[in-house]
Image (spheres, rainbow, N blue to C red):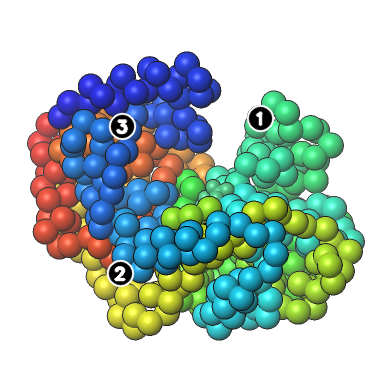
């Protein structure tokens, strides 16, 4: 495959955009080479500026659950655009999508729309702090909750519980209020709570981790967090930016039958437009301005184009009783196909899968937290990535990303993907 036009466009972009991209992981730094520039996409495929076609397993990093340029979403956006693109006034559309979201997701009474997953998570912890009157939060190593200061914290060492910032510009003052725990390690969470009695407002977690590859919660882990929160008057925040409307209509809360206190959304909820949201029961949501003292706002929040796209998306998901079964079956088929091929090779691997999230870790043995995810062989991943790309299969340019299966993907597409894995294994 040739990437001449992408290369030229990347050079040009680097002159005026830092690193040539508006979000770092797009730059291919983790895998080397030149990012491909997208020109258009339809269904399961994305087409680049050189005219290459790829079967897309990134799907805009999650939103395109039903495929690219999904007609109900496209039609809704075009239709709305003609009636004005922003008013800064409430619209009937916002209530309509809020009512639908509240009906689909368990355990929430009210929802507030924002413009990104980052904003949703940032607002959720402010609300949790305002509600509990406490400053500290627990987050898990390897979980991503957007790029706001409180979340850009990595462990100084495995034993350290006080966070140190992993980006310049995040102050020590902010970092000290983020406590880091190991995913799937309840005992560690318990120790952190003991050491910070009555100071912790909330635990925030990806109920299925998707930003260190796919890592499902172990048996009893989420239940244990729920119990710890109840026993210590802390809130449990599910960051469902990735899992919301993807693992089930009601997200991870429904799938695992566990109630969170605040739930964050993004990605699928916007149908490919910039949308995020956070939601909770009345007693918590009523603390938010203008009802309560916790401030949160947005000029373009609830934007009509974004709400029209999100509403069309949620309606389609809500109406399709077989959707989540189909997604799971396709993902399972892909899993079995890749597993069979890699089992016949010398390559060490572990595949994690849940619903329509799957990842291939090039590492033998269980992958259940950031430490085990980081053990993966990145050289193998780089070779795998470029081999797949050159065979027309677009996976995320990072070993720490989940593949997102879309309903638009056909079994022929999956067979083609499995064949590409077999070519890679042969080489
Ligand atoms: C993508 C993601 C975010 C951030 O959302 P943006 O829309 O990129 O700001 C937050 N949390 C999780 C779990 C995510 O996957």
Query: Image quarter for residue 54?
Result: top left
In the picture, measured across the screen, residue 305 lies left or right of residue 69, that is right
Q: Residue at image x 32%, y 75%? A: 323
Q: Residue at image x 40%, y 18%? A: 12
Q: Residue at image x 15%, y 62%? A: 411
Q: Which residue is mark 2?
A: 328
Image quadrant containing the C terminus? top left
**Circle 2 — which element?**
helix
Disc 2 and disc 1: Cα gap in Å? Answer: 37 Å
Circle number at residue 36: 3
**Circle 1 — which element?**
loop
Image quadrant containing the N terminus? top left
Q: Residue at image x 34%, y 83%? A: 321
In the picture, measured across the screen, residue 93 lies left or right of residue 73, that is right
Mark earlier in primary sequence (3, 1): 3
Disc 2 and disc 3: Cα gap in Å? Answer: 29 Å
Q: Which residue is mark 1?
A: 167
Q: Nearer the viewer, residue 230 or 50?
A: 50
State whether label 1 is within 8 Å of ligand 1.
Answer: no
Residue 363 locus on image (x, y percent)? 34, 42
**Circle 3 — which element?**
loop
Circle number at residue 306: none
Query: Image quarter for residue 295?
Result: bottom right
Where 156 falls versus 349 (above or below)? Answer: above
Residue 246 locus on image (x, y percent)? 43, 66
């Amino acid at each position: 495959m040739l990437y001449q036009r992408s290369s030229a466009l990347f050079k040009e972009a680097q002159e005026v955009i830092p690193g040539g991209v508006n979000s770092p992981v797009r730059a291919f730094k983790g895998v080397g080479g030149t990012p491909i520039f997208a020109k258009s996409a339809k269904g399961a495929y994305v087409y680049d500026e050189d005219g290459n076609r790829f079967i897309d397993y990134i799907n805009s990093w999650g939103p395109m659950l039903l495929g690219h340029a999904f007609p109900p979403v496209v039609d809704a956006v075009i239709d709305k655009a003609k009636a004005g693109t922003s008013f800064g006034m409430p619209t009937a559309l916002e209530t309509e999508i809020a009512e639908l979201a509240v009906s689909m997701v368990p355990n929430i009474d009210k929802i507030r729309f924002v413009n990104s997953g980052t904003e949703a998570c940032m607002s959720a912890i402010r609300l949790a702090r305002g509600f509990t009157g406490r400053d500290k939060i627990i987050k898990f190593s390897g979980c991503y909750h957007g790029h706001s200061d409180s979340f850009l914290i990595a462990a100084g060492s495995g034993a350290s519980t006080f966070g140190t910032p992993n980006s310049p510009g995040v102050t020590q003052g902010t970092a000290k209020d983020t406590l880091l725990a190991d995913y799937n390690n309840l005992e560690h969470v318990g120790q952190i709570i003991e050491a910070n009695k009555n100071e912790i407002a909330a635990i925030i977690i990806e109920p299925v981790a998707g930003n260190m590859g796919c890592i499902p919660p172990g048996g009893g882990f989420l239940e244990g967090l729920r119990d710890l929160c109840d026993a210590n008057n802390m809130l449990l925040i599910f960051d469902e930016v990735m899992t919301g409307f993807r693992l089930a209509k009601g997200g991870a809360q429904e799938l695992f039958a566990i109630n969170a206190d605040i739930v964050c959304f993004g990605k699928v909820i916007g149908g490919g437009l910039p949308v995020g949201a956070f939601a909770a029961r009345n007693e918590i949501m009523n603390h938010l301005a203008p009802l309560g003292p916790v401030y949160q706002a947005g000029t373009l929040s609830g934007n009509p184009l974004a709400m029209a796209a999100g509403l069309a998306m949620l309606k389609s998901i809500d109406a399709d009783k077989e959707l989540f079964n189909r997604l799971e079956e396709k993902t399972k088929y892909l899993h079995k196909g890749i597993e069979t091929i890699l089992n016949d090779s010398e390559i060490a691997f572990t595949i994690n899968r849940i619903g329509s999230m799957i990842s291939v870790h090039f590492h033998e043995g269980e992958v259940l937290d950031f430490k085990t995810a980081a053990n993966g062989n990145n050289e193998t991943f780089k070779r795998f990535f470029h081999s797949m790309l050159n065979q027309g299969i677009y996976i995320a340019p990072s070993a720490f990303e989940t593949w997102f299966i879309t309903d638009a993907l056909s079994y022929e597409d999956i067979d083609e993907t499995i064949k590409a894995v077999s070519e890679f294994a042969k080489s």
